[in-house]
Amino acid sequence: MTVADAAGTIPAVLPVTGTVDLQTTGRRTGHQRWVEIWFVYVDGQLVVTGTPGARNWLANLRSTPEARVRFRDPLREVAVVARLVKDPAERRRLVPLIWEAQPWYAEQPFSMEDWVADAPLVVLTGTDHG
């Protein structure tokens, strides 16, 4: 199946965690940028995240929340809108779920409090109605 053949929606069945390609719009250049990124599907939401710290893709989403995600199996590209998770209570609720879904994160040299305070947490919602 090609991207053009695929319905433009987030797949109904996703693994709990994996990688996707995320396309953002450069905040300074306006150019489209792709990055491979981990996602976690928790609480009925597609969340892209990473260890605490600054990320260009996150700065790009702050500037332009409209983006695209390319899933690999099945191959499908979907228009999404990003919502940066800023609310401390929501972050505290999501981080343990993310760590449970992707145990590798808990092995990194950051505490759960570091994650709540400074990890990129972005919920992606599909906008295509294909």
Image: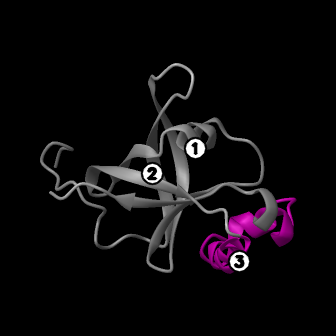
Q: Give the label on residue 20, or none.
A: 2
Label 2: element kind: strand
- Under mark 1, the amino acid is Arg
The numbered mark, 2 or 1, whose residue comes first in the sequence reads 2
The numbered mark, 1 or 3, whose residue comes first in the sequence reads 1
Q: Give the mark count.
A: 3
- Under mark 2, the amino acid is Val
**Quadrant housing the C terminus:** bottom left
Q: Residue at x 71, y 77 (%)?
A: 89
Q: Position of residue 52 (x, y in %)?
A: 77, 53
Query: Does residue 111 appear left or right of residue 32 in this picture?
Result: right
Q: Residue at x 41, y 44 (%)?
A: 66
- Under mark 3, the amino acid is Ala
Q: Residue at x 81, y 71 (%)?
A: 112
What residue does disc 1 label? 62
The magenta segment is 88-115
